[in-house]
Amino acid sequence: MDWQALTLTLRLASITTVILLMLSVPLAALLVLGRSRWLAFLEAIATLPLVLPPTVLGFFLLVLLGPRTAIGRAIIVLLGHPLAFSFSGLVVGSIVYSLPFAVQPLVAGFGAVDMALVDAARLLGAGPARVVFTLFIPLAKRSLLAAGILTFLHTVGEFGVVLMLGGDIPGSTRTLSILLYNQVENFDYAAAARTAAILLTLSIAALAAIYIGSRSRGGRRA
Amino acid sequence: MLEFALDARRGHFCLQAKGRFSSEWTVVFGPSGSGKSTLLRLLAGLDPPSQGKVVFDGETWTDTAQDIYRKPGRRGVALVAQQPALFPHMSVAANVGYGLAGLDRKERTARVSEMLTLVEAASFAHRGPRELSGGEAQRVALARALAISPRLLLLDEPFSALDGAASDALLSRLQSWLGERRVQTVLVTHDATDAYASGAEVAQLHEGKIAAVGPAASVLSIERRRILDRLGDS
């Protein structure tokens, strides 16, 4: 049992989830409340990681964060080391990779809030931030929970981006899914089965939490 | 004094309304689909017009030519629609206090209870909106809108869920409250008797245009004859 890979994976998923929710709530609110036609492009970009092969995404990030680009060079100057092949690099990669899994449920949840309520709040002097905190978040709690859990699970299971961007450094970038791949390559099927079982259990438990949450509030259509 | 000249397009519907409402109580009368709600939303600033302007008491609220657009919450305007749109996760009192974030706690509590008394809703201040009848919810929506001390009140058939007697009693209390505070009011309705009852300035809206403005007796003479003919027939 590789505790190091397990804790690394959980740490990566937790940090990614927290940062991504903080970014996605304002982004989803902008997509729901905004009127500009440019928002269609923004939504397309925020959804892109859903359809892009993870290896392609990992490759772009690897190049972008490496010494070949101005952004990459700036990061090297600021941090003293490149983001690629480090835990922070994985966090950046995971945030981009899991973005649609946080934004989509929030856009659906916020969009389902009656716009007449938003109009009433605007007339009473509420700005966008107050609309988000007093209406969107309390009325779309379940979407927020779904966004958090989906982001967490998607990050736990990510493979292509981690492989391209993080390599396979124990304690730094070797997550459970990379570990599983290594174990299979080494024909250590017994260890691979244990790793796979952990990933499976995590996924089932988290999904069950979403559905228990929605059923306890009086069925799915409540 | 409310002055406006507005052009707006909503699908196939085109609103081209121009008017000047100077009396304290103006009733905009028009059948369904004549653009009444659209007009109120444009005046409140909830939707931008394609072009045009809105000026209230010398303050420009909207002017597309000069790129002026004041946010709804900064106009001192209240709009109460047919659908009460109460915040479902807050109590009646919290709904009424929502627009009073700038006041301290004591002032806020006092204002909320004043408003609830005005609309006779004090007895269910701690209930949730889901436990209210349609009429109760409309009264709370009115209290919430008036709590911010608006200078202009826009009413979009807000008493539709109240029965006749209750609606008349509320209307007379409301009118004296508004009169004391010199709040200008624009009420839209498709009901000619409502327009008559208030005895106010009446503007007739027809297919997105203001067809006539004046005293109820002259603007609504045709409507009045139609209603009387109908009553005579039966």
Image (cartoon, coloured by chain):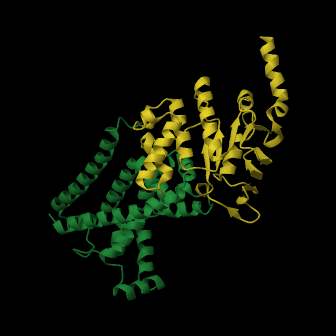
**Residue closer to the observer: B147 or B95:** B147
Q: Which chain is green?
A: A
Above or below — where is A178 with respect to B77? below
Q: Provide residue A61's location: percent of width, then percent of height.
A: 43, 74
Above or below — where is A54 with respect to A137? below
Task: Using residue B141 as the reference point, say whether residue A210 is left or right of it.
Answer: left
Q: Provide residue A149's location: percent of width, then percent of height.
A: 33, 54
Q: Residue at x 52, y 64 (%)?
A: A45
Q: Is residue A59 visible?
A: yes
Q: Provide residue A168's location: percent of width, then percent of height.
A: 27, 74
Q: Is residue B86 visible?
A: no
Task: Using residue B227 as the reference point, say whether residue B124 is left or right of it.
Answer: left
Quadrant assignment, res A196? bottom left
**Residue closer to the observer: B166 or A58:** B166
Above or below — where is B151 with respect to A64? above
Question: Of all residues shown, which one is farthest toward the front?
Answer: B180
Above or below — where is B186 with respect to A67? above
Q: Provide residue B183's location: percent of width, then percent of height.
A: 65, 46
Q: Quadrant of the C terminus of chain A?
A: top left
Quadrant assignment, res B90? top left
Q: Residue at x 75, y 66 (%)?
A: B66
**Residue closer to the observer: B21 or A186:** B21
Q: Quadrant of the N terminus of chain A?
A: bottom left
| Count of number-bearing discs | 0
Q: Residue at x 25, y 49 (%)?
A: A205
Q: Which chain is yellow?
A: B
Question: Of all residues shown, which one is farthest toward the top?
Answer: B234
**Residue closer to the observer: B163 or B118:** B118
Task: Using residue B71 as the reference point, say whether residue B28 is left or right of it.
Answer: right
Task: Using residue A82 as the reference point, say whether residue A49 is left or right of it.
Answer: right
